[in-house]
Image: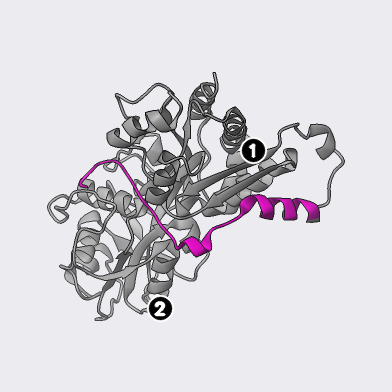
Amino acid sequence: MNRRTFRRAAVPAALALTLGLAACSGSNETTTTGNEGANASDLSGSIAGAGASTQTAAQQAWAAGFNATNPDVTVNYDPVGSGAGREQFLTGGVPFAGSDAYLDEEELTSSEERCAGGSAIDLPVYVSPIAVAYNLPGVEDLQLSPTTLANIFNGTITTWNDPAIAADNPGVTLPATTVNPVHRSDDSGTTENFTDYLHATAPEAWTAEPDGEWPLQTGEAAQGTSGVVQAIGAGEGSIGYADESQVAASALQTASLKVGESWVAPSAEAAATALDSSSRVEGRPEGDIAIEIDRTTTADGAYPLFIVSYAIACTAYEDATQGELVKAYLTYVTSEEGQQAAAENAGSAPISDTLREDITTSLDMIGA
């Protein structure tokens, strides 16, 4: 594929979440304040989304929050991966998708038929760092420069006491343990973001173009985000990359990356700082908001290895009710309340007020 757009993440379909049902159950168990009935909407029906596994925890929070004021609406989200989610959306299987990559030109063209004469739009709804997680007992606060990280994953560095790692970590005693780099086996948006970071920051060490499919015959392959996290935890000396929210829920440690002359750990705040250095992709359809991430920023406190994950919707639907429900749901997702719910549940970085205003303008196009 060799593209600069960021695509595809997958987990087994058996892990699909019926978030609307979970939301209804959660709301029944929660003590009410007496205001829910007064604020409840007259919307009813069900909508289904599919896509990026990175959004799983956030989608749980969004479905629950939306259901609190829309008790007659069921929202289902299946974390089958970015590529599969976009495919289901473009073939009419689901009215919205989650994706760690915005639609490419070919997908935008095919969306015209799917979107009843309108067009598909990408809306950035989830911002989260990609953590470099490792399993190396006795070594804390690991630091890795982009070139060192690239050489770990391209197979050049094979032991943890390699001089390059030692140079990044002065005064640290490193074992001679074999390095086991773990990557995604599936076509993954997280992989495309990770390889884009390596390509942009260490081009001499990482010559492969960014791609959702792992481009080299190196390391251990694991299915989905959860598979990568499990594989790292199962093997001493292992290192891999995954959405920080899922790494934080494990016992794994995470490395700080060199940004300019500083070492920066993954955090929602640091990812948000890096996002502020990024720009919009030009030449996109009206209402589409695709972000070109600046991986080489040296802004103070920025962590440029992060994901911007999108909700993908149509500006027109054959079923107007579906369009109304998608619009209402994504309005909640991108609201201050919805973004705070995701931050608390998934550790993501809330979008800015300026970006929210632009997304609101885009959402107003649905059904207009």
In the picture provided, is 77 more to the left or to the right than 296? Answer: right
In the picture provided, is 74 more to the left or to the right than 260? Answer: right
State the residue lying farthest toward the right. Answer: 34
Q: Residue at image x 34%, y 34%?
A: 110
Q: As rendered, which of 365 and 38 lies closer to the eye?
A: 365
| Numbered label attached to residue 105 | none
| Numbered label attached to residue 234 | 2
Q: Say above or below: 335 vs 188.
A: above
Instruction: Report the span colored magenta.
Output: 1-28
Q: Secondary structure at mark 1?
A: helix
Q: Residue at image x 59%, y 32%?
A: 331
Q: Say above or below: 293 vs 281.
A: below
Is disc 2 surrounded by few (<14), some (14 to 19) or many (20+) residues within 10 Å? few
Q: As rendered, which of 66 and 233 lies closer to the eye?
A: 66
Q: Secondary structure at mark 2?
A: helix
The x and y percentages for residue 136 are 36, 75
The x and y percentages for residue 100 are 40, 46
The answer to the question of whether label 1 and label 2 lie on touching residues, with beta carbons closer than 8 A, is no
The residue to which callout 1 is attached is 337
Q: CA distance from mark 1 to mark 2?
A: 38 Å
User: Is 343 in the magenta?
Assistant: no
Q: Residue at image x 25%, y 60%?
A: 149
